[in-house]
């Protein structure tokens, strides 16, 4: 271990888990980290310890893609599904919406058979 280095391997800072020491950079020790969403990022030790960097910077893009898709495009949700507002606020999704996102298929939502769930939402947007 280099002299004066605070070993961070295995520590968690916000959504980032430190995996590996990469060496010294211009701004201090460089650490290879993995975000809870699965993305990887290289961050300096001082940025981690001072809380300036707590995630990969891209994990919110997936969450917001649901809102953009539903608002801007003709999703199955626009075909009279009464769960539409709830899905937006509670981050829920139904099977027809999953098929529409992945394959562009037109399936009318059937809340009796495919009620929206957080599990389906996570499967679509947290991969």
Image (spheres, rainbow, N blue to C red):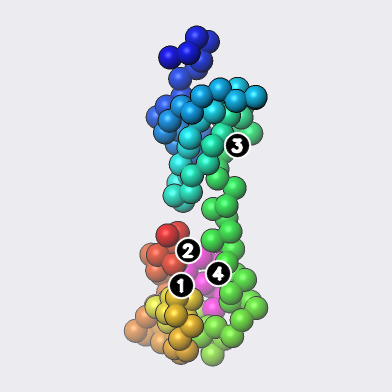
Q: CA distance from mark 2 to mark 4?
A: 8 Å
Q: Are marks 1 and 4 in contact (CB under 8 Å)?
A: yes
Residue at disc 2, secondary structure: helix
Q: Which range is magenta?
A: 84-92
Q: CA distance from mark 1 to mark 4?
A: 9 Å
* Residue pointed to by mark 2: 125
Q: Are marks 1 and 2 in contact (CB under 8 Å)?
A: yes
- Residue at point 53% right, 72% down? 86
Q: CA distance from mark 3 to mark 2?
A: 22 Å
Going from the N terminus, do you reach mark 1 or mark 2 first? 1
* Residue pointed to by mark 3: 53
Report the predominant secondary structure element of the magenta stretch. Answer: helix
Closest to the camera, between mark 1 and mark 4, is 4
Residue at disc 1, secondary structure: loop
- Looking at the figure, which quarter contains the N terminus? top left
Q: CA distance from mark 4 to mark 3?
A: 25 Å
Q: CA distance from mark 3 to mark 1?
A: 30 Å
Going from the N terminus, do you reach mark 4 or mark 3 first? 3
Q: Are marks 2 and 4 in contact (CB under 8 Å)?
A: yes
Instruction: Give the crowd class for mark 3: few <14, some 14-19, many >=20 residues within 10 Å.
Output: some
Residue at disc 4, secondary structure: helix
Q: CA distance from mark 1 to mark 2?
A: 10 Å
Closest to the camera, between mark 1 and mark 2, is 2
Answer yes or no: is residue 57 visible: yes
- Residue at point 55% right, 69% down? 66
- Residue at point 43% right, 30% down? 20
* Residue pointed to by mark 4: 66
* Residue pointed to by mark 1: 93
Residue at disc 3, secondary structure: loop
Closest to the camera, between mark 4 and mark 3, is 3
Say above or below: 3 vs 59.
Answer: above
């Amino acid at each position: 271990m280099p002299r004066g280095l605070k070993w961070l391997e295995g520590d968690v800072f916000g959504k980032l888990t430190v995996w590996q020491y990469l060496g010294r950079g211009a701004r201090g020790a460089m650490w290879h980290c993995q975000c809870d969403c699965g993305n990887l990022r290289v961050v300096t030790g001082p940025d981690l310890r001072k809380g300036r960097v707590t995630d990969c910077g891209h994990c919110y893009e997936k969450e917001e893609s649901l809102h953009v898709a539903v608002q801007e495009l003709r999703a199955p949700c626009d075909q009279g599904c009464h769960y539409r507002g709830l899905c937006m606020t509670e981050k829920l999704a139904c099977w027809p919406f999953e098929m529409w996102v992945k394959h562009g298929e037109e399936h009318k939502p059937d809340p009796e058979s495919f009620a929206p769930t957080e599990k389906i939402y996570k499967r679509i947007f947290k991969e």
